[in-house]
């Protein structure tokens, strides 16, 4: 992708492979294919040497509306304000709730 281009997700598949209970997950992304309008990416997440998630996605690659307007002429320039993309650090999913016991029920005192 060229600097300043936008990418919109058109397809997304995420597989959780293992729970992250401690440590810090590390994600590595790879562009599998990049055409003039689409890209296919893969993201692998590891935690303490163990694969914890895998993601594949397809993206539509385009110029932001302001760049299109500049290229096509000022008559098409948008009047709204374009906000920069917000980056969010990767957060591990919350741990599952404790399993309910199948034994006798506790009674209130």
Image (tube, grey):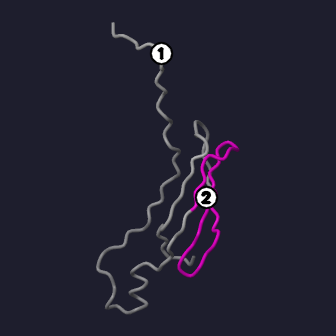
How would you rate the neighbour count of disc 1 (Cα within 10 Å): few for under 14, some for 14-19, many for 20 or more? few
Could you say whether the residue bearing mark 1 is in a helix, strand or loop?
loop
* Image spot of residue 74 (x, y percent): 34, 91
The C terminus - image quarter: top left
Task: Answer above or below: position of 16 versus 88.
Answer: above
Disc 2 target residue: 43
Q: Is residue 83 magenta?
A: no
41 in magenta = yes
Q: How far from the left and from the top, in percent, is residue 51?
A: 66, 47
Q: Which of the marked residues, 2 or 1, is nearer the chain's N terminus?
A: 2
Residue 76 in which image quadrant: bottom left
Q: At which x and y percent is residue 57?
A: 55, 64
Q: Name the residue under label 1.
A: 103
Name the residue located 57 percent from the left edge and 51 percent from the top edge. Answer: 15
Magenta range: 28-56
Give the residue drawn at x 42%, y 85%: 68
| Magenta stretch: helix, strand or loop mostly | strand
Q: Is residue 45 left or right of residue 104?
A: right
């Amino acid at each position: 992708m060229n600097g300043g281009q936008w990418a919109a997700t058109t397809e997304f598949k995420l597989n959780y492979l293992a729970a992250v209970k401690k440590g810090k997950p590390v994600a590595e992304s790879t562009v599998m294919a990049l055409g003039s309008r689409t890209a296919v990416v893969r993201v692998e997440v590891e935690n303490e040497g163990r694969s914890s998630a895998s993601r594949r996605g397809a993206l539509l690659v385009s110029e932001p509306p302001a760049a299109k307007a500049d290229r096509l002429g000022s008559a098409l320039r948008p009047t709204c304000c374009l906000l920069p993309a917000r980056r969010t650090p990767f957060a591990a999913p919350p741990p599952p709730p404790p399993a309910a016991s199948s034994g006798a029920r506790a009674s209130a005192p």
